[in-house]
């Protein structure tokens, strides 16, 4: 038996996400200094669901505080094209209706319904437990500097929403990183 046939016979891990060809996990392009989450439980914050080393720990999660809604703002260090997203959570408290807004800053619960979402995702409990990637309306996410995620409700209608993992997949757009520019002093 040669090495190729041995490798082919080995089963793939169940938790593996099938990332589309040419797409990457955009975690390395998130501007962490600007990430915000409204209505999060302070002991179960957004970093638990978004940060690389924490989001794969089943014991950690993002939880809502006063009701089931969450409003998450994720800025990127450079312009990206967003292709797909993954949301992982418990069957009961996991998100159900997820609205995504491209390049909308300073949104709050009072004005979230004033803007049409770039895309709306209706998640099933299968999406939440099976690591299923959700393709986005790619044409709406071609020039993304920031993403606002509105978790409108959860699977069971309970007062607390929980998210174990949020992963965003896409590509970077070749542009100049404005933070790398230095001011030229006039003489």
Image (cartoon, rainbow, N blue to C red):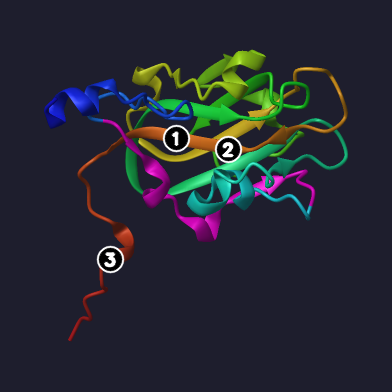
Question: Which is closer to the viewer, label 2 or label 1?
Answer: 2
Closer to us: 4 or 21: 4
- Residue 123: % across, % down: 62, 16
Mark 3: secondary structure: helix
Mark 1: secondary structure: strand
- Residue 108: % across, % down: 71, 39
Residue 186 showing in the rendered view:
yes
- Residue at 32% x, 28% y is 142
Quarter of the N terminus within the rendering: top left
- Residue at 66% x, 30% y is 89
Residue with the most extreme front position = 1
- Residue at 83% x, 33% y is 160
User: Image height check: is 89 above or below 64?
Assistant: above
User: Image height check: is 1 above or below 54?
Assistant: above
Say whether disc 3 or disc 1 marks the residue closer to the N-terminus.
1
Question: Which is closer to the viewer, label 3 or label 1?
Answer: 1
């Amino acid at each position: 038996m040669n090495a190729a046939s041995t490798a082919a016979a080995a089963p793939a891990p169940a938790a593996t996400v099938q990332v589309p060809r040419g797409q990457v996990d955009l975690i390395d392009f998130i501007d962490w200094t600007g990430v915000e989450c409204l209505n999060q439980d302070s002991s179960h914050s957004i970093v638990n669901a978004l940060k690389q080393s924490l989001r794969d720990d089943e014991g950690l999660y993002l939880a809502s505080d006063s009701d089931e809604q969450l409003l998450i703002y994720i800025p990127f260090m450079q312009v990206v094209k967003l292709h797909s997203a993954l949301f992982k959570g418990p069957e009961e408290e996991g998100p159900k209706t997820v609205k995504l807004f491209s390049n909308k800053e300073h949104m709050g619960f009072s004005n979230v319904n004033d803007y049409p979402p770039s895309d709306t995702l209706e998640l099933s409990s299968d999406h939440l437990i099976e690591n299923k990637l959700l393709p986005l309306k790619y044409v709406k996410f071609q020039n993304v500097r920031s993403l606002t995620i509105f978790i409108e409700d959860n699977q069971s209608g309970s007062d607390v929403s929980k998210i174990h993992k949020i992963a965003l997949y896409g590509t970077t757009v070749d542009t100049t990183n404005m933070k790398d520019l230095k001011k030229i002093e006039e003489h």
